[in-house]
Image (cartoon, helix red, strand yellow):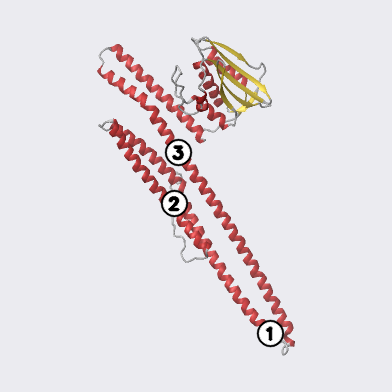
Amino acid sequence: MKEAFSLRTVRKKILMLTKLAGAALIVAYVLSTALPVGKDASFLIWLGFSLLLVLGMDYFMACFITKPISRLNASAKRIASLDFSAPCDIVSSDEFGELSASLNSMAENLQQALARLADANAQLEDTNAQLEDTNARLEDANVRLEDTNARLEDTNAWLADTNARLEDTNVRLEDTNAQLEDANARLEQDVEKERLLLAERKELVDSLSHEMKTPLGIIRAYAEGLLDEQEETKKQKYAQVIVSEVERMNGLIVTLLDLSALESGAAPLDATRFDFVELVEIVAGRLLVDAPDTDFELQYDLPEQKVFVRTDRRRMEQVLDNLIVNARKNVSPGGVLRLELAVEGGMLHFSVFNQGRPIPENDLPRIWTKFYRDSGAKYSGSGLGLSIVAQILSMQNLPYGAENQDDGVRFCFSVPVTE
């Protein structure tokens, strides 16, 4: 437990900073809205605190990442130019500290290798001097020629061993450089991952803040009316409105958190083999056949035999729920709602068509984005259903789309068939 909450890595430090920043933003927002000032003043207070928090985050990011990287880069350049006078002085328990220690160790090994090379050169010069002296005395020392040749052979062996050690040193230097490049690549990946996580958290906070304004305003207005109203019937009505808005906020938060978990990879898919035709029949029966007060004509074309696929059954049921509910909400009174399921080329193709008003062509690419709502729709929703559909299908690389037809809109996707 102590190791899990320690700050021994750059990643954990950044995670802690981002979580503290997110908590500070939420607390600042709550406190600013609770102050006895106007909305504009409250917003300016919260905005000022947010700017200070951003500057603080920049300062801490510079301390944790930018400055250590600059110092490591400067040390690496000095080592590359064979300047070992100033070792890297970063002392920390994270990856920068380990990298600093590795650079200092590499510099020390390089310095020792250069010193050994200088010693070897000096010994070679001494050997050459001995050879010149031996050649000068050859005429007077023929009897010692064999002994001199033996010493020359020993010297050559020593030189070969020195060259082998130098080659081994070069191999170790190349391996060290490869390790440094790999460490830099992993560091860049970690920094990019943390940047994406921070952007996702900011988008989630911004979305929640935007979507909560309307229900919170309604709850506050009806709560104030509940305090002032004397008639019991109106009090009951106000209380019902407050409960309805709270349930709406809860559903929005749960759906948004589910979508955020899918986008960040925190909710992985659990693939199983199941009959997709049976799943469509179950979902359609629950949402269309058994639904009360239906005012549309249901048409369907499903295979009579079983068709098996391998994917996440629960998530695919969520996809079918959102697409069928979307079609049921948009079908015109007395219009046609048609389900189709066909097998072709090893793929199972699903489509749902609702007769009614088409989607504006300019808005077709936007219907899969979060919080998109058609301004001409006669119902209100969270604007997250189709976003969840797109995320689940994209995670499995399954093709999907939507198109306007002559008298309505058709949504479709395809799944590979499993033998």
Q: Secondary structure at mark 3?
A: helix
**Are circles 3 and 1 on residues that touch, CB within 8 Å?**
no
Measure how far apart labels 3 and 2 are at the Cα level: 19 Å
Image-based side of 42 in relation to 171, left or right = left
Say which amino acid is labelled 2. Answer: Thr
Question: Mark 2 against mark 1, which lies toward the viewer?
Answer: 2
Residue ID for mark 2: 66
Instruction: Residue at 59%, 32% (x, y): give it.
Output: 397
Of the two numbered discs 3 and 1 in the rendering, the one whose residue sits closer to the viewer: 3
Q: Amino acid at mark 3?
A: Ala
Q: Marks 3 and 2: CB-CB under 8 Å?
A: no
Relative to 3, say whether 341 is above or below: above
Instruction: Identify whether 283 is placed above or below 64.
Output: above
How many residues crowd mark 1 within 10 Å: few (<14), some (14–19), many (20+)?
A: some
Tell me if residue 335 comes above or below residue 350 in the rendering.
above
Give the mark nearest the N terminus, 3 or 2: 2
Q: Which mark is residue 199?
A: 3
Is label 2 in a helix, a strand or a loop?
helix
Q: Earlier in the sequence, mark 3 or mark 1?
A: 1
For the N terminus, the image quarter is: top left
The residue tagged 1 is: 134
Quadrant of the snapshot with the C terminus: top right
* Residue 364, position as x, y percentages in the image: 52, 25
| Nearest to the observer: residue 254 or residue 399 | 399
Label 1 secondary element? helix
Q: Gap in Å between the C-alphas at discs 3 and 1?
A: 78 Å
User: In the image, is residue 123 above or below residue 380?
Assistant: below
Q: Position of residue 257 (x, y in %)?
A: 45, 30
